[in-house]
Every structure is written in structure tokens, then in C-alpha cells.
Amino acid sequence: MPVTAPGASPPGASPAAVSPAAGNPLRDFYETPGVPLCSGPDRARRQARMLAQVLRDAVGPAVILDVGCGDGSVLAVMARQNPGHRFAGIDWSSGGVRSARSLGLTVLRGGVTPGLPVADGTVDVVIMSELIEHLVDPDGAVAEVRRVLRPGGSLLLSTPNLAAWYNRGLLALGVQPVFSEVSLRGVFGRPGSVVAGHLRLYTRRALTGFLSASGFRCVTVAGARYHDVPRPLGPLDRAFCRWPSAASILLVHARKVLDGRWRRRPAPGPQASMRRPRASARRRRAGLRRRQASGRPSAGARVPRSR
């Protein structure tokens, strides 16, 4: 997996070379001690299982890149349970990178935008484990993932579900949904006390539509439970995993669509939705109304024959 772009340091390099820009509130937030850099062993195990299913048919050692690897705990479990493949991670948190490297992992310090420090088409599988909800520019991030993937390569993505079963009830009662945040300084209007830095949330429909429009084909969408659900509600949370649209966590396996089968949709112009119909279409509709008013059959209509 060749490293190409500046802005990320190889293992052993000085972090000062790629230190986050001063005055960036979001980067300052992730450098704050106590901000969670992983989601626990459940997340690690489920990502390892998803990856194992994808790698079953791999021919030779595959290259796996964990974007937003945090402290490397998930990456370490995946590497341990899927030996014989090449693993690397990227994260912009200096504390997370130090922790991951202490586990013997190959980890670069950098961000997904303006560009991943990886050459085009050199990665077989990209992991985005509960990362996309933290991103300012998910469009640019997914475009970068598509760039570094080989043709037909896989994206394994997980993210909290805005339409989780309990969020539907909370929102109906006027309570801020779980996983959503209005501030980086505290939790307001919803259950919980930990600020995770979530900037945007997805439903199943929104996430699959977004990935399809970004040049991916969604192979599977599954549900997973949330580790912070109160214990009495745990069985209910596990039951909703069978209905991904209402599950706590969305798990998506998507494949990169070949360039010849996918055309990027241009962004609509400011007046795209206000364009007037073409004159020929207006004339056809006006003629149809006149024929209907006069009782004459429209073009192509069948006229019953008298016997």
C-alpha cells in the first residue's frame, strides 16, 4: 500500500510534522483527554466477523485499511482473527496513533480529507467503523475511499442509526435522539453524558442512497446492538437487529462500482427545480386538453367499431 501524499507521517516520524492546525475546534476536541477513541470489544468482534466474510474468497494476501482506527483496538482484533493479510490504519488523533503503534500496528497520522495518503487502487478493503458520523465532508471522504480501492474492492461501514427503535419513541416525545449532539461541550436534551463528536446521522435509506450515488453497490445491510442500551432493554435491542432499519447500529458491506457502470450525478444548479417545461411538451398537453373538451379521441386511442 504505497504512501503518496504529504500530510501523514509514517511510523516513527515526528508527529509535529503533521500536527493539527491550531484553532480547529473539532481537532482540538479529539485531542482532549477522555474523549473515547474506541467503542469497546463488541464493535471489534463484529468488524472482525464482517471482514472474515469478505476475505473468504480473497486470492493471496489482501490489503486492509482502517480509516479512523482510533487507538487500534479494533484493527488489532481484525488482524489477529484474519492472519495472512496486510493491515494498516489512519487516524488524526496523536493519542490514538501512539496507542495503536504500541500494539505493533502500522498506523499513519492523517485525515481523510483533503486526501488519504494512499495511492490509487491499492487497497482491497476499507474499514470505516463508526467514522462517517464524525466527518465534516462525508462526500469527499467516500470519494477518497473509492479512489484508493481496487475495482470491486469492499467498503465495510458501520454507523449509529438515527431511526433506531428507541429514537423513534424519544423523538415523538420531544426528546433529542440518542447519538445526536448539538454541542462539543456537553450533552443537551438527550439521554447519556458522553460527547462523542457526532456531526451527522443516517437512516438505512439515507445511507444506502448516499453510497449508491457515490459509486458503490450495497451488498448487505445488517443491524447490530448498542452497548450502552440499559440491560433490561438488551433483549429488545438484540431483537431489533433482525430489522436493520430500526436497529441501533447499521452495518453495510458495499463494493466499488466499476467506472464504466457509474456516472457521477452533477450537483443541481440553483434554478434546476424551477425550469419551465419545453414548448413542445406544453403544446402536446394543450392539444390533449382541446381534444378532450371537444370529445375527439386522443392520438393512439382505440375507437370501438360498430358492428
Image: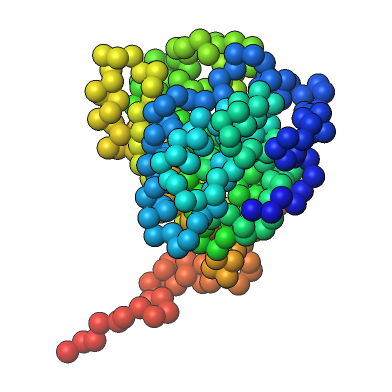
The residue lying at 55 percent from left, 52 percent from top is 63
- Pick whichever, 30 or 60, lies toward us: 60
78 lies left or right of 19:
left
Q: Report x, y in % for residue 276.
A: 64, 58
Q: Quadrant of residue 10?
A: top right
Q: Nearer the viewer, residue 265 or 78?
A: 78
> Residue 5, position in %: x, y?
77, 48
Relative to 18, residue 171 above or below: above
Q: Nearer the viewer, residue 23 or 104?
A: 104
Tell which residue pokes out farthest to the left in this image.
307
Asked if one can make out residue 172 in the rendered structure from this viewpoint, the answer is no
Q: Position of residue 4 (x, y in %)?
A: 75, 52
Q: Is residue 43 above or below residue 117?
A: above
Could one spot residue 102 in this view of the protein?
A: yes
In x, y percent, where is residue 148? 63, 54
Horizontally, is 6 left or right of 39 in the view?
Answer: right
